Structure formats: structure tokens, C-alpha cells
Amino acid sequence: MRKLVVIVELGVVVMGLGVAIWAIYRFLHLSSTPPCPPLSAIEAQLRQDPAAQQCADISVEVDRCVVKLQGRIESEENRARLRSVVQNIRGITYVNDTLMRIVEAPFCVVLDILEPIQKHAETHDFGLKVRLVNKEGKQSPVYVQGENLIIEVTTPAKFESFVYVDYYSTDGQVQHLFPNITEPLNLLPPRSVYTVGQLDDKHMKWTPLPPFGRELISVIVTKQPLVFTPKTPRYDPELASAYLDQLRQAIPRDEALAKAEIAATFHPLETRKTGAESP
């Protein structure tokens, strides 16, 4: 009986010692774990990094020290860089960047320029509508070699519009689809429907050419014409980077944009050599 009492007492001591050790561990662990940083501190750290300053549009969410990065970034290298920046912030336990998509140049530059105009137009409900269709009239984001590229533009109801339709290709070029040498007049009445690439004798026909891959169509409509330097028609393909530098200067920004009657949108597409092959 005496032996049983000793064993029970020893068990109580061991249990008490275990509880004490666990309490000490929790105290030391919690006191050494830094608090989660505020969202503003994480955003400020990101804004300072070059990877987030150009060709990027990133939103940040924080939930119990887990950071979620969403939006777009120019390259996988830049995504890894920003992930590392956030992971190294004291208090962050995990970074989820699976919803951050890669949008390469020059396409990301187009989005940098046109996204503020798109948001401005949506705020004012200008009503620009654009559809990419094939010759059967079906909406399609994928085009194969020899297939006609057709863009149906419905201009805003609130103002007459100068219309500009551009095609940014995977090789860094831009082709100005409208206006063009056959259709030089691009001023359209309100609520007009104009089909760029329409299959008749009055319109230029457009088809994807190699190299194939991910490409982009942009549409800008504005009450005031865009003024470029030099003021000559831009009918021939040119380097997208050179054109975008001029486009950035031609469109209204900041306070001027707030008062402007202008709208824009863009549509990514994929071009392929055949319907079965990947680009």
C-alpha cells in the first residue's frame, strides 16, 4: 500500500512539473513571437521595391499574420522578389501569392496606361462596349493563323468619339488597326457600332501572323483626338515601347482625366499556328 501511495505522489509531481514546463514554454514562446505588422506597413514596404513600382498592380490582404498578394506583376522573378520582401517582414508567418498573375511587357505597360482611364469611364458610366468575334460572329479569345480578327466597337452614348484600336503582338510590336489607310476617318457619332476588320471591300482585313502567343487588343475612345508627335497618321507597325511613350503623353492624366470624356478597354487574346497546337 505504501508503494502505491509513493507512485501516485510521484505521478502527481511529474504531472505538475510537466504543466509548469509547458507554461514556461508558452510564456517564452509568446513573448518572443513578434506581433503581426499592420497592413499599411506591409504596403509601404512593397511600394519601396522596384518590382512593385512599374508594370505591377498589387493588392495586399492580411489575416492573422498570413499575407495574400493579388493582382499582376511583370515576371516570375519579380513575384519571387516581392514574396521574399514580405516574408522577411518581422511577424509574417506565410505569404500566399498564387493569385498574382504574370503580365509581361509591353502588355503590362498598356494596362498601366489604360486601367485608370477604364476606371474613370466605369465611374461615369460612359458605356463603351467591345467584342472580339470571329467570322461566324462568335466571341473568341483564341485565333489561329489565317482566321480573321474582328473587333466590334460600340461607342459611348454621351459623346461623339475618336476611336483608336491597337493590336499589341508577342514580338513587342503594335499594329494600329483603326484608323488605317483604308479607313482614315475615326470620328463616330454617339452609340455607334463600328466593326473593325469587317469582311467586305470597305474595311481592312486583319489576321494573326507569327510569332504566335499571348497578345492584346486595346480600344480608346475620346471626345478630343489624341495628339501625337509628329502629327502624321500611324498606319504602319512600330515598336510598342516607342508608341506607348507617346501615348502616355497624349492621354489626359490626374485632374485633366477627371474632367475628360474618354474611355478605354483592353482584351487579351491568344494566337496559334493551328487550332490544335499551343502557341
Image: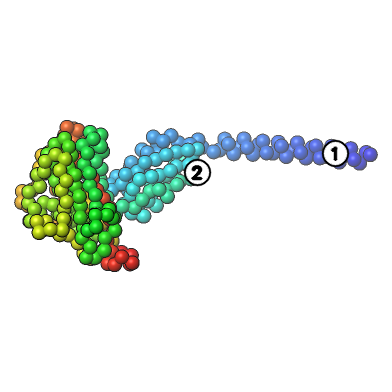
Q: Residue 253: which numbered mark, if any?
A: none
Image quarter hosting the N terminus? top right
Q: Residue at left 45%, top 46%?
A: 95
Q: Residue at left 83%, top 39%?
A: 10
| Mark 2 closeness class: few <14, some 14–19, many ≥20 residues within 10 Å | some
Q: Residue at left 89%, top 37%?
A: 5
How much space separates mark 1 and mark 2, taking CA atoms?
43 Å
Q: Is there any visible trace of residue 278 in the rendered image?
A: yes
Q: Residue 93: which numbered mark, if any?
A: 2
Q: Which of 105 and 262 is in front in this view?
A: 262
Where's residue 146, x and y in %? 21, 65
Q: Is there any visible trace of residue 221 in the rendered image?
A: no
Considering only order in the chain, which callout, 2 or 1, is on the residue closer to the N terminus?
1
Where's residue 226, x and y in %? 11, 44
Q: Residue 8: which numbered mark, if any?
A: 1
Which of the 4 image quarters holds residue 249? top left
Which of the 4 image quarters holds residue 46? top left
- Cβ atoms under marks 1 and 2 closer than 8 Å: no
Judging from the image, what secondary structure is the residue with disc 2 in? loop
Residue type, numbered disc 1: Val
Q: Nearer the viewer, residue 57 or 233?
A: 233
